[in-house]
């Protein structure tokens, strides 16, 4: 009996030592699964349930309140911005203290018409002078103080009060500079006493301590200014003229389209006869001789014509 029990125990131990086929297969399956890559995780789509009618109706008053509050906030912000802008001081504008002025003779319409017809012969990049802007410059002041304007008016009145009307005549056209590429096309002007008036105005302005143009005086009327390549016009002669009854003081305002002239003052040539010599310039009487005129005749000879 003892022998049979021990044999039975040994068989049981042998069976325990032998691995079962099912266990081996399970182990191999687990190992194979461990070596395989992990399967991708798919996102879970959230299914949105449609709102119910009662929920939509409950949220409507809240949306209306939000829109009203947003509109009120926007209006309040705009109102505050407007009030701040009104209370803010505007930036100070630059006020000029000097200006561009010139003494000149104005050209009447009877002369500007034919000159305007001559301008039609220009071709290319010429900027013509308007009929209302044509003038004869007597003295140019590139930078005159505005607070000295009264002195400039008084100077013009003083230098023209003893002048009579001038017979102004036009001559031929010309260019400045005459050589190379010209910048200005003009017509020459002549008048007795015109050069003397221009010189007196320049000297008077310089005595006031105000700057004048350095170029010498040449009486002319500017017809056009060259702004680019442009051919010349053949010389032209004008048998035209007018009687100038006065001069003007003009202010020039520069613009992109050209200067704009503002008439500041007018000076009339009112004297009908040449000025009577001053006492210091009156010749002393000569002693009477047989061939000399009598005192009465001598007085009549010295009177202005």
Image (cartoon, helix red, strand yellow):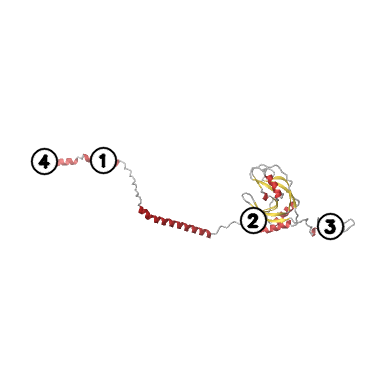
What is the CA distance from the residue labelled 1 to the residue labelled 2?
Answer: 104 Å
Question: Residue 176, can we see it?
Answer: no
Residue receiving disc 2: 98
Which of discs 3 and 4 lies nearer the camera? The answer is 3
| Distance (Cα) linking label 2 and label 3 | 51 Å
Q: Residue at x 65, y 57 (%)?
A: 146
Residue 304 image-quadrant placement = bottom right
Q: Is residue 113 left or right of 56 when viewed as pictured?
A: right
Q: Position of residue 151 (x, y in %)?
A: 69, 58
Expressed as whole percent of the image width and height from the top left, the position of residue 116 reads 68, 46
Split into 4 quadrants, where in the image is the C terminus? bottom right
Q: Say whether residue 277 is left or right of residue 53.
A: right
The image quarter in which residue 99 lies: bottom right
Residue 49 image position (x, y, % from top left):
34, 49
Residue at x-position 47% and y-position 57%: 75
The first of marks 1 and 2 along the sequence is 1
**In this rendering, the label closer to the viewer, 1 or 2:** 2
**Circle 2 — which element?**
strand
Q: Badge 1: few (under 14), some or many (20 or more) residues near its Cα, within 10 Å? A: few
Given this view, does label 4 or label 2 mark the residue nearer the observer? Answer: 2
Q: Residue at x 49, y 58 (%)?
A: 79
Q: Nearer the viewer, residue 176 or 90?
A: 90
**Residue highlighted by disc 1:** 29
Mark in front: 4 vs 1? 1
User: Looking at the image, do the residues carrying marks 4 and 1 touch, with CB atoms under 8 Å apart?
Assistant: no
In this rendering, position of residue 302 left or right of residue 21: right
Q: Earlier in the sequence, mark 4 or mark 2?
A: 4
Q: CA distance from mark 4 to mark 2?
A: 141 Å
Against 105, residue 34 (above or below) is above
Residue closer to the observer: 224 or 117 = 117
Q: Which mark is residue 300?
A: 3
- Residue identifier under label 4: 4
């Amino acid at each position: 009996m003892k022998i049979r029990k021990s044999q039975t125990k040994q068989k049981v131990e042998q069976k325990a030592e032998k691995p079962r086929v099912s266990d081996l297969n399970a182990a191999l399956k687990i190992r194979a699964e461990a070596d395989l890559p992990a399967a991708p995780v798919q996102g879970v789509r959230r299914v949105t349930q449609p709102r119910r009618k009662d929920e939509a109706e409950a949220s409507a008053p809240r949306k209306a309140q939000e829109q009203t509050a947003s509109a009120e906030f926007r209006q309040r912000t705009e109102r505050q911005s407007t009030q701040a802008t009104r209370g803010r001081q505007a930036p100070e504008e630059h006020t000029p203290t000097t200006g561009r002025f010139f003494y000149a003779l104005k050209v009447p319409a009877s002369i500007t018409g034919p000159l305007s017809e001559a301008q039609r012969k220009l071709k290319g990049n010429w900027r013509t002078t308007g009929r209302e802007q044509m003038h004869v410059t007597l003295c140019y002041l590139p930078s005159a103080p505005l607070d000295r304007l009264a002195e400039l008016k008084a100077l013009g009145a003083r230098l023209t009060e003893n002048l009579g009307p001038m017979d102004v005549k036009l001559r031929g056209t010309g260019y400045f500079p005459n050589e190379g590429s010209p910048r200005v096309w003009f017509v020459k002007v002549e008048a007795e006493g015109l050069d003397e008036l221009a010189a007196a105005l320049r000297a008077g302005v310089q005595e006031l301590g105000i700057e004048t143009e350095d170029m010498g005086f040449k009486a002319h009327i500017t017809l056009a200014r060259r702004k680019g390549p442009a051919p010349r016009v053949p010389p032209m002669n004008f048998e035209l003229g007018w009687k100038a009854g006065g001069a003007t003081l003009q202010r020039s305002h520069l613009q992109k389209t050209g200067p704009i002239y503002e008439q500041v003052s007018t000076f009339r040539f009112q004297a009908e006869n040449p000025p009577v010599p001053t006492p210091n310039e009156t010749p002393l009487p000569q002693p009477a001789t047989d061939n000399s005129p009598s005192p009465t005749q001598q007085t009549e000879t010295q009177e202005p014509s």
